[in-house]
Amino acid sequence: MDEKIATLLRQLNPKNTKTNEPLSGYTNLKIGGPADILYIAHDIKDLINVVSLAKRMDIPVTVLGRGTNILISDDGIRGLVVINKANTINIAGEKPVSEDAIPIIPRWESDSQKGTFKYEFKDLDYDETGEARVEVIIDSGVDLPFALRYLLDKNITGLQWYAGIPGTIGGAIYNNIHGGTHFLSEVVKKVKILDKDLHTRELDIKELGADYDKSRFHNSGEVILQGTFNLYRGDVEKAKFTAREWAERKKIQPRNSPGCCFANLTQEQKEKFEYPTTAMGYVIEHVFKMTGFKIGDAAVSKAHHNFIVNEGKATARDYLAVMKEIYKRTKETLDIEIVPEIMLLGFKDEEIKEFTKKEQEELRKVRNEEIRTVYK
Ligand SMILES: Cc1cc2nc3c(=O)[nH]c(=O)nc-3n(C[C@H](O)[C@H](O)[C@H](O)COP(=O)(O)OP(=O)(O)OC[C@H]3O[C@@H](n4cnc5c(N)ncnc54)[C@H](O)[C@@H]3O)c2cc1C
């Protein structure tokens, strides 16, 4: 065993620590090789301590939530992997309507024709930004579905749009998740972080670089510790109905997946090819006719073609091969560089070179800009 890893190991509580632990058990996909050290952090202090210890020794650190948005390599992840289970919710109190609340940035209109996006949401949408505000501080390791239920029981609304989305508050902030026409950044006020110099500090919403499936945390190496949310004393029954209904409609999305695999097309691309929708699932199903396509046990889902699922014993290699086949067909047929929406962890650069191109970053920017301008 590497000397540094052995030294770190001696300093950790053995009850929370495992060595050479397969990461497949910590992900939705049930795919992933071992972590040198896996540590379960049960509170924020513990999370800060373990990350700081490892970083001071120059050991790479990866913080995971519930592993619902990741594909981990068959070789696993070197260094320390922390599973974040910090789980406190603190209702700080009633607040006047905040000056900081950022305006709603709708995602896109749901299709008028049923069967293209496969789920509709526009009819559920409403605006509660006029309601009284409540400040709630939530640890990054809290499960989002739990936070939603817990807060609705306390008559606090604002998270109903994210019903049916698995994962933690930390993962949700990391990717600025979207639900229906809403983005989490609408209700985030501040985020407490552990920065690269191992200091804790608070970032204001405007410093988060929050965008569609994006935030500063994708490149910053910072650890998300807590989010301060500006939620509402809104209509609880309406919010409960919305959450139930939205979760029901999302049930067609397969759980044995890391969520939607590729970003949708831009408006310009949709118009150029005269497709009825920007949905990448449409392209995979109707243009490439990949229903039933699989490599090993990694398969294009029949329920939603932009989801790649593990039907049993899929490896990361199988999964990546399916992604690359979709990439190849899109490149050859449409001359488009598609952008993955899932995080690829533990891979060597050359293994994922198709998905780390500059043009993809550019396309992402175009798409984000469109979301703001076309659907305002
Ligand atoms: C069936 C299904 C439906 C989904 N629907 C949606 C949807 O409607 N909208 C949507 O936006 N997403 C959706 N997702 C994607 C996914 O659920 C979210 O992105 C989720 O928020 C990820 O949270 P997690 O805790 O599982 O993160 P993980 O998968 O564990 O991690 C994801 C990334 O976040 C980083 N990370 C996690 N916690 C921290 C932290 N505390 N500090 C720093 N970095 C951290 C990890 O290092 C990793 O890079 C869906 C997924 C599935 C499987």
Image (cartoon, helix red, strand yellow):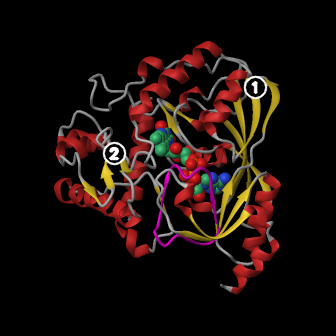
Alpha carbons under labels 2 and 1: distance apart: 37 Å
Q: Is residue 304 among the parts visible in the rendering?
A: yes
Q: Position of residue 249 (x, y in %)?
A: 42, 26
Q: Does the magenta stretch include residue 64?
A: yes
Pick the front one: 319 or 358: 319
Q: In this view, does 307 lie to the left or right of 48?
A: left
Pick the front one: 371 or 300: 300
- Compared with 329, 357 (above or below) is below
| Element class at badge 2 | loop
Q: Which of marks 2 and 1 is nearer the N terminus?
A: 1
Q: Where is residue 71 in the image (x, y as percent from the top left)?
A: 46, 59
Q: Which residue is drawn at 79% across and 25% down?
A: 95
Q: Position of residue 28 (x, y in %)?
A: 50, 50
Q: Where is residue 101 in the image (x, y as percent from the top left)?
A: 66, 31
**Based on the displayed image, in which of its 4 quarters is residue 97 positioned?**
top right
Q: In this view, does 298 lie to the left or right of 190?
A: left
Residue assigned mark 2: 306
Q: Is residue 216 among the parts visible in the rendering?
A: no
Q: Is residue 318 left or right of residue 272?
A: right
Magenta-drawn segment: 62-80
Residue assigned mark 1: 134
Please, what is the three-letter code of the amino acid marked with disc 1? Answer: Val
Badge 2 density bin: few <14, some 14–19, many ≥20, Cα 10 Å: many
Please, what is the three-letter code of the amino acid marked with disc 2? Answer: Asn
